[in-house]
Amino acid sequence: MHEKTRLIHAGRTPERLARTVGPPIQRGSTVLLPDSRALYDEDLGYGRAGLAAQAALIDALTELEGAQSVQLYPSGLSALTGALLAVLKAGDSVLLSEGAYKPTRQFCQNVLGRLGVRIQLHDARLSAEEVLALVADDTRIILLESPSSLTFEIQDVPAIAAGARARGVLTLIDNTWAAGLYFKPLAHGVDISVQALTKYVCGHSDIFMGSAAAADPAIGALLEAGVHDLGWAVTGEAAYDMLRGLRTLPTRLARHDQSARAIAGWLAEQPQVLKVLHPALPGDPGHAIWARDYSGACGLFGLVMRPAPLSAQHAFLDALKLFGLGFSWGGFESLAIRCDPQLASRTFVTAMEGPLMRLHIGLEDEADLTRDLTAALAAYDTATG
Ligand SMILES: *Cc1c(COP(=O)(O)O)cnc(C)c1O
């Protein structure tokens, strides 16, 4: 054979036993089929569907979600947009919580609107009965997020899901806050459970991925067809790293929860703070439903500050030494942002009683973080005058 041919046929993967704890990372678009008959028979005919590491991650997420099937997407946002596109057609409408992640709302308004899907926004503070009263003849799906992004309202998800099912309407929840661990949407009657794995499952702020899980095989088949039709794929390397994050998720999340609850409780007593938005705190409006449905809380919560000029908000954030200023969360590190510019684009809750801040409590020592916040609150006072 010519060298050109030998170089192509040499060095094929040896068939050795895989004895590592994690799955092998296979790289492959082409998948070789064993014989001619298998070409159109095997369900794995092309690498975009995922190889060993993606399959191992899907198995683990199926366990986490209590699902019948799980689909992977290259980001949390594409899991949300992909799941919606998989079930909607022109003439349908989406009943969308205003508390949904802002890019999800923008996708609904910009893209689904253009495709002939009507968008109905509902206030995240509505009761289950009030949400269900908004269901119209064309409502195909209700999109929930609980607690809401930025404002942390808790929705009565089981009651909304039960009422929706009785009306033949689907429900989808963005369950990123509970990381698939502290709230089990499918067990509470939700049809599609989505999370941005980018946040807590990854846990290290360095990979994008999303998942959509379903308990009903018919919905699972729609989601799978959607992934295939739209061409989403994730790499074996990313799936491997995501699975590694999943192994330590319960341990990390318990630690985030413990520190965040302690710091949130302490912040609620500080004179610069009007209120803390954290559903695990007994005074929170969502506390009763949270305590009924959730087995824990993550490290993310909100803070409504005593009214002060913008310069004081900058002084607060700029005084933080251990908290990074950044828009993500779910990693090992503490983060802070101010939220008012994002609230301004909303319809129902456009502002709180004072400046709204969001904190992500990471895995640093709790006393060190409290000291950092003490200095920032002092800077807030100084800048307020
Ligand atoms: C970050 C986030 C997403 C989007 O995840 P990406 O992987 O960044 O696309 C979706 N929903 C919520 C609630 C998020 O916080």
Image: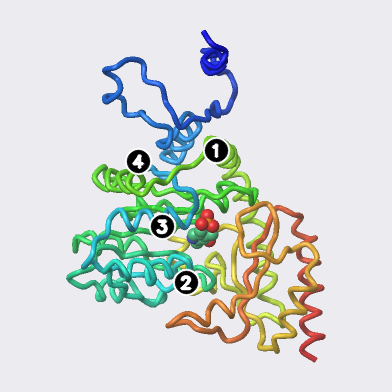
Q: CA distance from mark 1 to mark 2?
A: 30 Å
Q: Residue furthest top?
A: 1
Q: Secondary structure at mark 2?
A: loop
Comes first in the chain, label 3 or label 2: 3
Q: Tell me the mark number nearer the camera, choosing from 1 and 2.
A: 1
Image check: 34 left or right of 149? Answer: left
Q: Secondary structure at mark 1?
A: helix
Location of residue 122 (image quadrant): bottom left
- Residue 69, label in figure: 4
Q: Secondary structure at mark 3?
A: helix
Q: Nearer the viewer, residue 270 or 149?
A: 149
Q: CA distance from mark 2 to mark 4?
A: 29 Å
User: Residue 225 at what x, y percent from top left?
Assistant: 30, 45
Q: Nearer the viewer, residue 278 or 86?
A: 86
Check disc 1 and report the residue beneath it.
243
Check disc 3 and report the residue beneath it.
80
Comes first in the chain, label 2 or label 4: 4
Instruction: Kindly indicate whether the residue at mark 2 contacts the one at mark 3 (C-beta within 8 angstroms).
Output: no
Q: CA distance from mark 3 to mark 2?
A: 20 Å
Q: Is mark 3 within 8 Å of ligand 1?
A: yes
The amino acid type found where label 3 is placed reads: Leu
- Give the crowd class for mark 4: few <14, some 14-19, many >=20 residues within 10 Å: many
Location of residue 34 (image quadrant): top left
Comes first in the chain, label 1 or label 3: 3
Image check: 260 left or right of 44? Answer: right
Check disc 2 and report the residue beneath it.
153
Is residue 177 among what the camera can see?
no
Comes first in the chain, label 4 or label 1: 4
User: Residue 259 at what x, y percent from top left?
Assistant: 68, 58
Q: CA distance from mark 1 to mark 3?
A: 20 Å
